[in-house]
Amino acid sequence: MRTRLLSALVSLALASGAWAQRLAHTFSIVARDPATGELGVAVQSHWFSVGTDVVWAEAGVGAVATQSFVETSYGPLGLDLMRGGKTAPEALAALLASDENRQVRQVAMIDAQGRVAAHTGTKCIAAAGHSVGKNYSVQANLMEKATVWPAMAHAFEAAQGDLTERLLAALEAAQGEGGDIRGRQSAAILVVKGKSTGRPWADRVVDLRVEDHPDPIAELKRLVSVRRAYDHMDAGDACATRKDWDCAAREYGAAERMQPDNMEVVFWHAVTLVTGKRVEEALPLFKKVFAREPKWAELVTRLPAAGLLPADENLIRRITGR
């Protein structure tokens, strides 16, 4: 019953034009990390906010890139079909069969078991094509030359690190081959866990977009670095909740080393050190913050009432210098 219902919805959506089409000529990659099960998709284009329509992924289900003359519904409907038990090749075939404009579409899907499918329509603007490998597919259209997607495949296969780093390596390789013949404007990356927790917001490992930038891949890489630092801060908060102050200081210290000029990171590292009774280590950090952001000294005076610093007037004076 569920499969028949999904098939009916697919046909209705594509036939009725329920989702507006947008232009998103671009290059992208969908992939799975067999070690962790993580699923991801990354993209760059000379088009504003390319991630809005192109990138789709759900933990324990799959990932989709839908581009060229975009039919956005390939994203949510593809995930619906894979969640309902279809493989990525079966899901893509079902969508294409119901789409009268399949010749202008470029779509790739990967499911939670690493099965991959890709389609490049005959009317996608050259240079256009795709390459499917083990646990990944790379695809591109409106490229400067036809070496773009092979370069992406090679870079992904050769790259070290986690799935996020390997996806970024593929994007860099594409741009290194000339990328989009029009240039570059936006980029996005979405990576989700291998298994669903039942809480979609907790299943996103990385979810970042660069909407408009002269060098979107470089900016995306910078944001990934910031995201990793904040992951350490989140871990530090979890340690603090358990009152494991050594763990909290360690995690916040890692975040600060990654983002030494981010005063938000430095400030909360200092607060964590004080809470863990490591005041002398914290004082130089507070001094660094106040030199850059003087108003944050006032913020310190408000934290005891929120339970984030000891209610000790002498201590607060030491920290603020007031």
Image: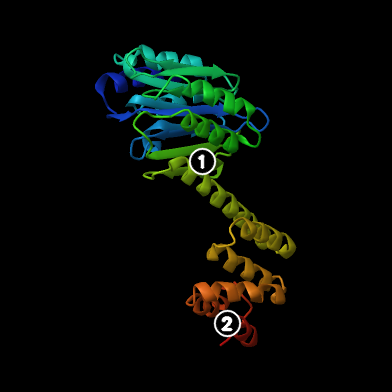
Q: Going 58% across and 85% down the picture, which residue do you hit?
A: 321
In this rendering, the answer to whether 213 lies above or below 31 is: below
Q: Going 41% across and 14% down the picture, which residue do you hit?
A: 94
Do the numbered discs 1 and 2 sit on residues whose CB atoms are within 8 Å? no
Residue underneath mark 1: 200
How far apart in space, not on screen, are marks 1 and 2 (Cα)?
41 Å
Residue underneath mark 2: 320
Q: Image quadrant for the N terminus?
A: top left
Viewer-proximal residue among 13 and 151: 151
Circle 2 crowding by C-alpha within 10 Å: few under 14, some 14–19, many from 20: some
Q: Of the residues shown, which amino acid type is indicated by label 2?
A: Thr
Marks 1 and 2, the one that precedes in the sequence: 1
Q: Image quadrant for the C terminus?
A: bottom right
Q: Of the residues shown, which amino acid type is indicated by label 1?
A: Pro
The way the protein has been coloured in the rendering is: rainbow
Instruction: Identify the element where label 1 is drawn.
Output: helix
> What is the x, y in percent for residue 44?
43, 34
Instruction: Identify the element where label 2 is drawn.
Output: helix
In this rendering, the answer to whether 217 lies above or below 101 is: below
Q: Is residue 24 left or right of residue 93?
A: left
Q: Nearer the viewer, mark 1 or mark 2?
A: 2
User: Which residue in the rendered view is the most extreme toward the left?
Assistant: 16
Disc number placed over residue 255 in the picture, else none: none
Q: Residue 62: tell me if it is visible.
A: no
> What is the x, y in percent for residue 142?
36, 24
In this rendering, the answer to whether 314 lies above or below 239 is: below
Q: Going 58% across and 68% down the picture, which residue do you hit?
A: 267
> What is the x, y in percent for residue 41?
50, 32
> What is the x, y in percent for residue 86?
50, 18
